[in-house]
Amino acid sequence: MQAIRKEVYILLHKGVIIKVPEFRIKGILCVSPVFTVPKKDGSSRFILNLKKLNESIKYYHFKMESVQSAVLLMTKNCYMASVDLVDFYYSCPVDFEYQLWALF
């Protein structure tokens, strides 16, 4: 439980999550469980388990391009770069009307 509190504190201070006022959650039936798993470096990874929510979402199939297809796009004198995306996921906002579906 302490690891979860620590991760919630970190995410709150990064502005990744917000505390939702009581009046906004009145009547909400979808609250998802959270837990942490240990990472190789000894820190914790915060997990929001949306399994139950996913069961009620319509699935659309899509094809994800492979690394091989990216390699085929490279030409002579092509430049490559590496970017550290540690917190990039947190920069993708969830639309206001859908935020209540990610309650924990």
Image (tube, grey):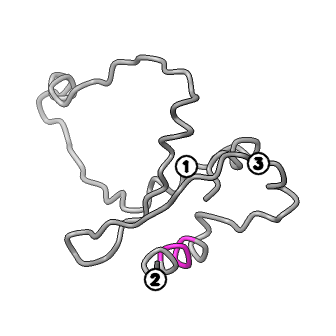
Q: Tell me: residue 28, above or below residue 21.
A: above
Which region of the structure is painted magenta? Answer: 7-11
Residue 12: quarter of image: bottom right
Residue 40 placed where, x, y %? 20, 70
- Looking at the image, is mark 1 or mark 3 nearer the viewer? 3
Residue at figure coordinates x 82%, y 49% from the top left: 27
Q: Which residue is mark 2?
A: 2
What whole-number distance in Å separates the C-alpha atoms at marks 2 and 3?
Answer: 26 Å
Q: Secondary structure at mark 2?
A: helix
Query: Which of the numbered marks, if any, corresponds to residue 28?
Result: 3
Disc 2 residue type? Answer: Gln
What whole-number distance in Å separates the C-alpha atoms at marks 1 and 3?
Answer: 24 Å
Specify whether 82 is left or right of 68. Answer: right
Residue at figure coordinates x 46%, y 78% from the top left: 1
Residue 84 placed where, x, y %? 32, 60
Query: Which of the numbered marks, if any, corresponds to residue 31?
Result: none
Q: Tell me: residue 52, above or below residue 34.
A: above
Residue 92 placed where, x, y %? 55, 49
Residue at figure coordinates x 62%, y 50% from the top left: 102
Compare marks 2 and 3 and give the one earlier in the sequence.
Answer: 2
Mark 1 closeness class: few <14, some 14–19, many ≥20 residues within 10 Å: few
Q: Tell me: residue 37, above or below residue 93.
A: below
Q: How many marks?
A: 3
Q: Which residue is mark 1?
A: 92
In this view of the protein, which residue sits in the foreground, 32 or 16?
A: 32
Residue at figure coordinates x 61%, y 59% from the top left: 104
Residue 63 placed where, x, y %? 34, 18
In this view of the protein, which residue sits in the foreground, 20 or 25?
A: 25
Q: Secondary structure at mark 1?
A: loop
Disc 3 residue type? Answer: Ile
